[in-house]
Amino acid sequence: MGTFAAVDLGASSGRVVVGRVLGAAGEQRVELHEVNRFPNGPVALYSGAVGERRLHWDVLALYRGILDGLRAATREAGRLDAVGIDSWAVDYGLLDADGVLLGNPVNYRDGRTAGMSERAFAVVPATELYARTGLQVQPFNTVFQLLAEQGGAQLDAARQLLLIPDLLGYWLTGSRGAEVTNASTTGLLDATTRTWTVDLAERLGIDPGLLPALREPGEALGPVLPAVREEIGHHAELPVVAVGSHDTASAVVGVPAEQPDFAYVSCGTWSLVGLELDRPVLTEASRAANFTNELGVDGTVRYLRNVMGLWVLQESIRTWSQAGLPADLADLLAAAAEVPALTTVVDLNAAAFLPPGDMPARIAAAATRTGQTPPQSQAETVRCILDSLALAYRGAVREATTLAGKDVGVVHVVGGGARNELLCQLTADATGLPVIAGPVEAAALGSVLVQARAVGVLSGGLAELRAVGARGQELRRHTPGRLVPDDAQWVAAERRLGLAAP
Ligand code: ADP
Ligand code: LRH
């Protein structure tokens, strides 16, 4: 009925996935097939200041990966009905007056934003910023990155800012804009009106002229440029459609929820834990808990907390591999399953875990600081990460439901982490709720669903799209209470970290 290409760029890898919408009306389902996957990650580059390096993304390698993927998709499908792009949030490229990219985008884990939130709050109080934007405070919010760039040659020369998926879409189509779900992570978008906070930008000394016109998911960017079509071997016209271009927004569309009372963990490099709401929660309690109101597809709000996620495990594996230690994920997870639960837990949301580096050493230091015995082996370190993630999910789900006044009956775990059975079971135990694990490629699925609706292959609201999405997927159910049945153990673990049990 329709064939689509979803470009999904995660912080660890990018992929191009072909999505086919199959079946008769009322029985439609989506079949996904990955046609290209390419690595992604921080690249440290000398910055021009002696002794200083900056973390960047290799944006042209990503663009090449996309073209290779679209070529493979075209070869496989013959003809595509549309393309959609999503990526991680907050990061951007700056264009000069000719529309040329001024520099390689900086990676959000770069340390140049230290002290920038405080600088912003001295001009616009944190309470006022939250009341308007509803955005969590993270050092890497676009607004803080821009403050760090002030006075620099590149920002001086810049005439427009394009977030990563918008930049890549611009290179495919020549059309510029800012898709709203990702724009909601900048700190410069009003969470209620879904428009730029031009006045706040001005007060912060940020030129609002940098911010392109907004578009909602489902709107067309335009056709792929003829020269690009030639490069990928696609002979017919090929529209690029704005999807939830923030990867988490697309992943939430891909959650196979049957009822509205669900929580989700979008579980990849980050774990994004929260709820889908109709309107933002802009209360002082919500701000104090650092919950974010990022925008979703169809006027929704993604009310969630960022948990540091499987990044900590990925970096541990990288550290071990560089030291010549065993580093196979499946073996490490099997060994971790043999370690007693909740022996050591750490607060993974501590700032120390944000930059790349030696996570096992940072975990050991965090354990010592909280009066616990540091993990003694690789298996114990992995178990500590998984137990600590589940503990953080428990806190986030409980706080989200309290702060938003919405009860949930199920937790959906989507993304690469849905493959981690131990983590999914621990999540069920920690939250006391059934967990439905899958799909792994939820962001690609969400992108395909929104594209298919935009070109008229599907219709309806999010519930109808989710019903189509769920039909084709392999899902696994975890009942709570199998590994850590006693809730008191979770409460005790929270107390060890000084976290109030919500
Ligand atoms: P991102 O979109 O942020 O790049 P993904 O959604 O691809 O991330 O998730 C990557 C994570 O998924 C990895 O860090 C890894 O922990 C987990 N993962 C991937 N494959 C498996 C697997 N076979 N078993 C367990 N975990 C897995
Ligand atoms: C996940 C993600 C998350 C953001 C972070 C920067 O990939 O988009 O939602 O907070 O990257």
Image (tube, rainbow, N blue to C red):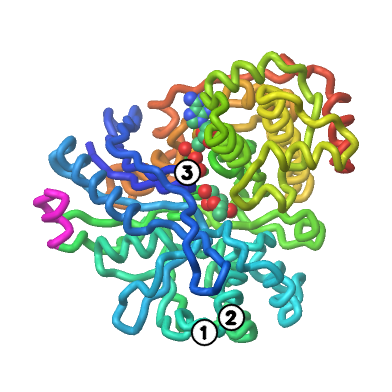
Task: Determine which quarter of the picture holds residue 410.
Answer: top right
Residue situated in front as seen by the camera: 151 or 267: 151
Q: Quadrant of the N terminus?
A: top left
Which numbered disc, 3 or 2, marks the residue that appears first in the sequence?
A: 3
* Ligand 1 is within 8 Å of the C-beta of the residue at disc 3: yes
* Residue indicated by mark 2: 201
Across the whole image, how many numbered discs are drawn on residues? 3
Q: Which residue is mark 1?
A: 207
Residue at left offset 55%, top offset 76%:
149
Location of residue 258 with respect to 79 vertically, above or below: above
Tags 1 and 3 touching, CB below 8 Å: no
Regarding residue 470, the answer to whether it shows in the image is yes
What residue is rendered at 81% in x and 37% in y? 367
Q: Residues within 10 Å of mark 2 (few under 14, many from 20)?
A: some
Element at label 1: loop
Q: Magenta span covers which residues? A: 226-236
Give the CA separation, mark 1 to mark 2: 7 Å
**Label 3: which residue?**
12
Q: Is residue 175 left or right of residue 314?
A: left
What secondary structure is found at the residue carrying circle 2?
Answer: helix
Percent of width and height locating residue 416: 50, 33
Q: Position of residue 494 (x, y in %)?
A: 85, 36
Q: Is residue 137 magenta?
A: no
Label 1, label 3: how far apart the Cα atoms are: 32 Å
In the rendered image, the quadrant that contains the C terminus is top right
- Residue at (34%, 71%) from the top-left corner? 176
The residue positioned 11% from the left and 52% from the top of the image is 236
Specify the amino acid type for callout 3.
Answer: Ser
